[in-house]
Image (spheres, rainbow, N blue to C red):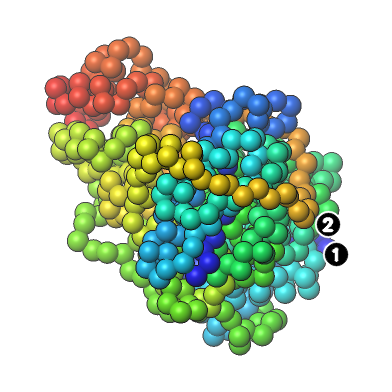
């Protein structure tokens, strides 16, 4: 058993995601406090891995890892974790990290804390802040045992602290990847033909509070009057009320408009990931305790339909 | 084809979440079906409609109110409903996943569906854990599933429409982000009729697992800031917003 912190980094199209650097920066802090090393782990090829401020970087390259494959990545990470016996394994609570973190936890019988906003030591013991319940509650939890898996929300730590130029050591896969049950077959590109919401200066964004497909028209009228485009949170898109090209958030697009006008979006961490850098955020929601009011610049606890209709009369 | 859907009954986040001690006050919250499970049930029924088979929905009955959720699942096209009598509203994801895995072992599942995540997944999601406990491959973030013979073809979403297609040898566990079609509506009359006639199989919980975490504190997040709240009637709010937007050259 060591006091090392392993950071499972993520990359796509030759570029590391911000959360990778964020976690490396946090890992350095933890490693200092625990007397261990911050180790960046890069799985898969097609990326230059000498970019972290880690104490060391391990790059595992194999043809079977050239595209994300949850089964292959899981096996490789499990083998590495068993070999290194770290104190903490950090994942991003992302579309790829989520496939492996809880799986590894169940496989190894090690605790897992998801939705992590902070990781620190208190009196030599690990403490994790988890922003669960759609951002409505923050839990402070202490993982038990020798090793903890922590899955971090993107945007929780500064990116810069993890950036550096530590030379990576490339190794072959520690496990046989010859008989996988899961095979990557092809990449899926976004469907074209719709407006690009990331390029819009103003967005009127609707959430579950819009209530039904028949009410989307009201948001569209308001958007038209403001010279804006309609975007949405995930539930609206999953319900089929707007196409996936309009989705803002973790599994959607990241936007940074001058105006982000929100109707009926509560502000779960997954949505905030996609829009919190907008220049002006105004949120209308009937729930005065909606987490969005901790992020928006202006807010009103009101009926979104009444406000939208009254605005239309004035515009 | 034996299609299994593992569901989670979770505290509703639509309302306030009162805290008691260092956890949610489970006695004073409403429990609802995890929203991603609605997608997962739909995807399972779509696969059944495409290739035939049986959809079994299984969940842990944490507070003795799971029947209503199971009746809804049956009304939406599931064929069988199973409840594990867990009776512990604080059962974590690890414990629920273990109970579910033990129950699923006897079902000869060809494919297991679960919602990709739930808002109370403090210790991770049950889908990935069920896969680990049953030694099946797992793919989460899935937005469509097609089954042909012993192979599933799934689309996994990364972000913004970018994704990847995978083929997996069955059996496997799929974490559903969104079904390939929006979930169907079940009329209340049909749900009522099913509630009268349906049989829900009861299974005792077996197996033990734990998140391995100790709760120290739970509270609403301390916000770094708060929105400046615009007060007044809806008309007044609208007028103030329009004025604000005009002052910033945004309207």
Residue corresponding to mark 1: A1
Q: Nearer the viewer, mark 1 or mark 2?
A: 2
Location of residue A40 (image quadrant)? bottom right
Q: What label sits on residue A146 in the rendered view?
A: 2
Q: Position of residue A11 (x, y in %)?
A: 51, 67
Query: Is residue A131 among the parts visible in the rendering?
Result: yes
Q: How many marks?
A: 2
The correct choice, above or below, for B249 with respect to B48 in the image is above
Q: Which residue corresponds to the image point at 26% horizontal and 14% vertical from the top-left?
A: B236
Q: Which residue corresponds to the image point at 84% horizontal and 41% vertical from the top-left?
A: A123
The correct choice, above or below, for A4 with respect to A234 in the image is below
Instruction: Describe residue B86's horizontal placement relative to residue B69 as left or right.
Output: right
Chain letter of mark 2 equals A
Instruction: Describe residue A277's horizontal placement relative to residue B19 as left or right.
Output: left
Q: Which residue corresponds to the image point at 26% horizontal and 26% vertical from the top-left?
A: A305
Q: Residues within 10 Å of mark 2 (few under 14, many from 20)?
A: some
Q: Residues within 10 Å of mark 1 (few under 14, many from 20)?
A: few
Is the residue under label 2 in contact with that under label 1 (CB below 8 Å)?
A: yes
Q: Position of residue A273 (x, y in %)?
A: 46, 47
Q: Position of residue A52 (x, y in %)?
A: 60, 65
Residues indicated by labels 1 and 2 sit on the same polypeptide chain = yes
Q: How far is mark 1 from mark 2, CA to CA?
A: 8 Å
Q: Describe the element under mark 2 as helix, strand or loop.
A: loop
The correct choice, above or below, for B150 with respect to B229 in the image is below
Chain letter of mark 1 equals A
Query: Is residue A15 among the parts visible in the rendering?
Result: no
| Viewer-closest of A315 and A240 | A240
Q: Describe the element under mark 1 as helix, strand or loop.
A: loop
Quadrant the C terminus of chain B occupies? top left
């Amino acid at each position: 058993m060591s006091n090392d912190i392993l950071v499972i980094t993520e990359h796509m199209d030759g570029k590391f995601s911000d959360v990778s650097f964020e976690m490396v920066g946090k890992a350095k802090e933890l490693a200092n406090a625990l007397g261990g090393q911050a180790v960046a782990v890069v799985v898969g090829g097609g990326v230059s891995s000498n970019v972290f401020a880690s104490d060391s970087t391990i790059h595992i390259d194999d043809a079977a890892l050239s595209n994300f494959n949850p089964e292959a990545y899981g096996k490789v990470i499990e083998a590495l974790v068993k070999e290194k016996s770290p104190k903490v394994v950090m994942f991003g609570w992302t579309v790829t990290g989520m496939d492996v973190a809880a799986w590894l936890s169940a496989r190894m019988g090690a605790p897992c804390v998801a939705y992590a906003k902070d990781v620190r030591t208190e009196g030599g013991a690990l403490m994790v802040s988890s922003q669960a319940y759609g951002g409505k509650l923050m839990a402070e939890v202490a993982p038990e045992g020798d090793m903890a898996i922590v899955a971090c929300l993107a945007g929780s730590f500064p990116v810069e602290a993890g950036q550096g130029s530590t030379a990576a050591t490339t190794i072959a896969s520690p496990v046989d990847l010859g008989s996988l049950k899961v095979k990557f077959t092809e990449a899926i590109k976004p469907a074209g033909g719709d407006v690009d919401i990331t390029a819009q200066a103003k967005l009127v964004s609707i959430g579950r509070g819009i209530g039904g497909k028949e009410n989307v028209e009201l948001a569209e009228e308001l958007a038209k009057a403001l010279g804006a485009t309609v975007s949405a949170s995930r539930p609206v898109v999953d319900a089929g009320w707007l196409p996936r090209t309009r989705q803002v958030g973790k599994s959607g697009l990241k936007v940074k408009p001058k105006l982000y006008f929100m109707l009926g979006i509560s502000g779960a961490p997954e949505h905030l990931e996609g829009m919190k850098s907008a220049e002006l955020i105004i949120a209308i929601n009937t729930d005065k305790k909606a987490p969005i009011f901790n992020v928006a610049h202006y807010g009103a606890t009101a009926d979104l339909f009444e406000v939208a209709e009254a605005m239309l009369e004035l515009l | 084809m034996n299609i299994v859907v593992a569901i989670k009954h979770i505290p509703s986040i639509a309302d306030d979440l009162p805290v008691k001690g260092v956890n949610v006050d489970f006695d004073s919250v409403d429990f609802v079906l995890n929203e991603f499970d609605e997608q997962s049930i739909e995807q399972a029924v779509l696969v059944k409609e495409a290739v035939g088979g049986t959809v079994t929905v299984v969940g842990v009955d944490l507070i003795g109110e799971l029947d209503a959720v199971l009746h809804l699942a049956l009304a939406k096209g599931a064929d069988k409903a199973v409840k594990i009598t867990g009776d512990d509203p604080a059962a974590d994801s690890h414990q629920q996943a273990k109970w579910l895995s033990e129950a699923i072992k006897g079902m000869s599942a060809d494919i297991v569906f679960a919602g990709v995540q739930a808002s109370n997944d403090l210790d991770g999601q049950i889908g990935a854990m069920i896969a680990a406990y049953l030694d099946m491959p797992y793919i989460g973030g899935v937005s469509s599933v097609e089954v042909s013979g012993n192979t599933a073809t799934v689309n996994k979403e990364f972000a913004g429409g970018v994704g990847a297609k995978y083929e997996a040898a069955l059996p496997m566990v799929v974490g559903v982000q969104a079904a390939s079609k929006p979930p169907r509506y079940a009329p209340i009359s049909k749900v009522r009729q099913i509630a009268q006639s349906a049989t829900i199989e009861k299974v005792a919980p077996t197996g033990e697992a734990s998140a391995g975490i100790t709760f120290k504190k739970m509270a609403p997040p301390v916000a770094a800031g708060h929105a400046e709240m615009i007060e007044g009637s809806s008309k007044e709010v609208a007028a103030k917003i329009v004025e604000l937007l005009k002052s910033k050259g945004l309207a």
